[in-house]
Image (cartoon, helix red, strand yellow):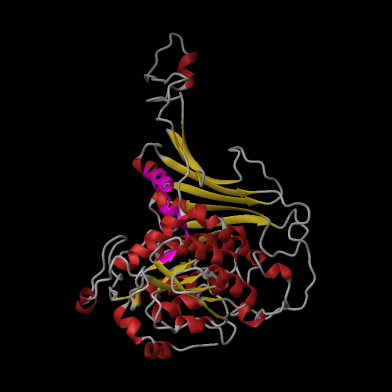
Amino acid sequence: MSISRRSFVSTAAAGMAGGLVAGTRADGSAGAVDGAASAADGAAGRPSQQTAASRARVRGANDRIRIGSIGVGGMGRSHLGNFQQHDDVQIVTVCDVWDVNRRRAQRMTERQTGGAATMEADYRKVVERTDLDAVIVATVDHWHAIPMILACQSGKDVYVEKPISHNVAEGRAMVAAARKYDRVVQVGTQQRSGRHFQEAISVVQSGALGKIHRIHAWNVGNQTPAGLGRPADVAVPAGLDWDTWLGPAPVVPFNPNRFIFQFRWFWDYAGGMMTDWGIHLLDLALWGMKQTAPKTVYAVGGNFVLDDNRETPDTIDAVYEFPGFICTYSNRTGNAYNGAGKGYGIEFYGTDATLFLDRAGFEVIPETGGTAKAPTPSYLSEQEPVVPAWKRDWNGPSRARAAGLRAGTSDQNLTHIRNFLDCMRTRQRPNSDIELGHFSTAMCLLGNVAYRTGHKLTWDAATEQCVDDPKANALLTREYRAPYTLPTI
């Protein structure tokens, strides 16, 4: 299963040299396409430097971007459907270790121009192809890093699902691969491409909420009492390559709860709700506050209410300390009540207003009354005669400190894919560039590390290590089961 970088360089030299390979126009005819252009050193949104050869091969507006998809389960097929809604996309091949997923995905491509996609069981056959411009990596979480890095090494751009990685170290390796091989890599934190999310973040950053000192994000629900249940180990389903599905993780018998969707609740493959949904919310916190990492992290929780075989906690609260504010994330599965009346969301608390944000829209709730320019000590009111030393200037109870605002939803999925496709042409950094995805993923992973170690972490963002904490640092990487090892960059 292991594959060397040398073999990729030899089999995909054309892709490395040209970046975007010869493709098919939307009308089905052959068309010239533009070459690679480095996205390595610019700030987000800054065009990269192109070679003379690539400038000579300018991709036409009607040229199709040829894509292979690795991992076509539920999320992968959702991406296929969304990519297919863009006229300049051709799905060339679909890949999955379970033949059921492969067949379902291929059926989705039967009516596209150029015919149905081919099917593969081995992701390496997708990555090695020289006729692809990009790959989608929508595998289980612990399988994101290896094909993403190899795709970058073979000269392909990548759309990779969140969380980008199983652990912090492989996330940093993914960033390094994207930069070294000059690839456009978009992470599936699609809220960054939603207009109402962009508008909400602009309000947060405008100062309209006053001094923001607390952020709270949450996912709540009630799965009691059985949760996932405790199914027994069973035979591997027909057509499933269970060994490859496990990949770098330890070998274990097949259990239904370790497969389709439920894999998220086992440490070998994922990080529970923290990395599944928490990343979408904590990504907004980093974006809104223009931060990349917390200073300290502490988390508490446990498996308190569900009678099932999950490993990740059914209840967890994490506290992240930043310069000038704190951010908290809460997940519980035994009670769905929330004061905001929402099962998930994020709130930014400022001295003048609160902003609530979720995928349905956002709302600014002003603070009212109670504004004092200076305090009046209570002892002065007890003196005779009363001689105030400070002037008090209160707002009336109905006087708002900020303007209220309410806005509805906006598309996030199609616009996010469109941003990726456009950046493939312009060689700009996309809205959810791989490093932004790494920062958000690492924040979630650190919450889990704090929970698993049982103590507060001090984070050194420059080295991406916990200060004087070997127990925590051991959880920032993993042992990779041979031959499913992380590629050398």
| Residue 187 located left or right of residue 51 | right
Residue at the image position 53 percent from the left and 60 percent from the top: 444
Q: Nearer the viewer, residue 233 or 135?
A: 135
Quarter placement of the N terminus = bottom right
Above or below, comparing residue 289 to residue 275 in the picture: above
Q: Is residue 163 visible?
A: no
Magenta span: helix, strand or loop, mainly? Answer: helix
Locate residue 250: give its quadrant: bottom right
Query: Any magenta on residue 199?
Result: yes
Q: Nearer the viewer, residue 77 or 326?
A: 77
Residue at the image position 29 percent from the left and 62 percent from the top: 43
- Which segment is the magenta one? 186-202
Q: Nearer the viewer, residue 122 or 280?
A: 122
| Residue 323 located left or right of residue 447 | left
Residue 103 position within the rendered picture, expressed as x and y whole percent measured from the top left: 60, 74
Residue 404 position within the rendered picture, expressed as x and y whole percent measured from the top left: 43, 31
Residue at the image position 39 percent from the left and 44 percent from the top: 199
Q: Is residue 183 visible?
A: yes
Query: Any magenta on residue 346?
Result: no
